[in-house]
Image (cartoon, grey):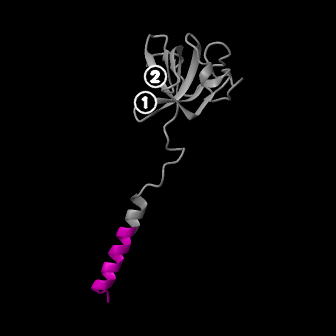
């Protein structure tokens, strides 16, 4: 015979199991949003604010924050090597409403546009190639 205690225990166990399957685990790299690629010309650099701005071919201007995780590839001097007028490609992620640069490299000259010569097969994944979409 089933008593109230057995039913209560079964209901509690079912609710616990449902709650455990509904609680998401910690965020992983698979759930993190991807990087977006931008091509443009450096218009300003602020070493004190750790930011730089680029103007894209359509005239749009974007500001990027630089962090310890930002890498500079083939740019002599890294962040200090960014100069006004330099054509660059920026791979960035939006964090707290601001673009944070993850990778910065020369733009037009030496850009493989996906051939894999310098960055691997997924070099231009998510690349807008300068469009203002």
For the N terminus, the quadrant is bottom left
Image marks 2 and 1: residues in contact by CB distance under 8 Å: yes
> At 44% across and 16% down in the image, what residue appears?
61
Asked if one can make out residue 105 in the rendered structure from this viewpoint, the answer is no
Picture coordinates of residue 105, whole percent (x, y): 62, 22
> At 59% across and 12% down in the image, what residue appears?
86
Secondary element at image label 2: strand
Picture coordinates of residue 33, whole percent (x, y): 48, 37
| The furthest residue to the left | 4
Q: Which residues are magenta?
A: 1-16
Q: Is residue 61 left or right of residue 2?
A: right
Q: Which residue is mark 1?
A: 98
Q: Quadrant of residue 9?
A: bottom left
Was residue 11 drawn as part of the magenta stretch in this picture? yes
Task: Rate crowding at label 1 as few (under 14), some (14 to 19) or many (20 or more) other CA atoms within 10 Å.
Answer: few
> Quick one: 7 or 73, which is closer to the camera?
73
> Quick one: 50 or 24, which is closer to the camera?
50
> Quick one: 1 or 26, which is closer to the camera?
26
Question: Disc 2 and disc 1: Cα gap in Å?
Answer: 8 Å
Was residue 51 drawn as part of the magenta stretch in this picture? no
Q: Is residue 115 above or below residue 3?
A: above
Q: Which residue is mark 2?
A: 63
Secondary element at image label 1: strand
């Amino acid at each position: 015979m089933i008593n109230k205690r057995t039913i209560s225990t079964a209901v509690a166990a079912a609710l616990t199991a449902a709650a455990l399957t509904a609680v998401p685990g910690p965020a992983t790299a698979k759930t993190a949003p991807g990087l977006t690629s931008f091509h443009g010309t450096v218009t300003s650099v602020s070493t004190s604010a750790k930011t730089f701005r680029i103007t894209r071919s359509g005239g749009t201007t974007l500001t990027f924050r630089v962090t310890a995780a930002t890498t500079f590839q083939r740019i002599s001097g890294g962040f200090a090597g960014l100069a006004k007028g330099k054509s660059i490609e920026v791979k960035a992620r939006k964090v707290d409403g601001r673009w944070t640069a993850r990778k910065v490299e020369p733009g037009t000259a030496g850009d493989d546009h996906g051939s894999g010569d310098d960055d691997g097969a997924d070099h231009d994944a998510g690349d807008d190639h300068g469009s203002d979409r």
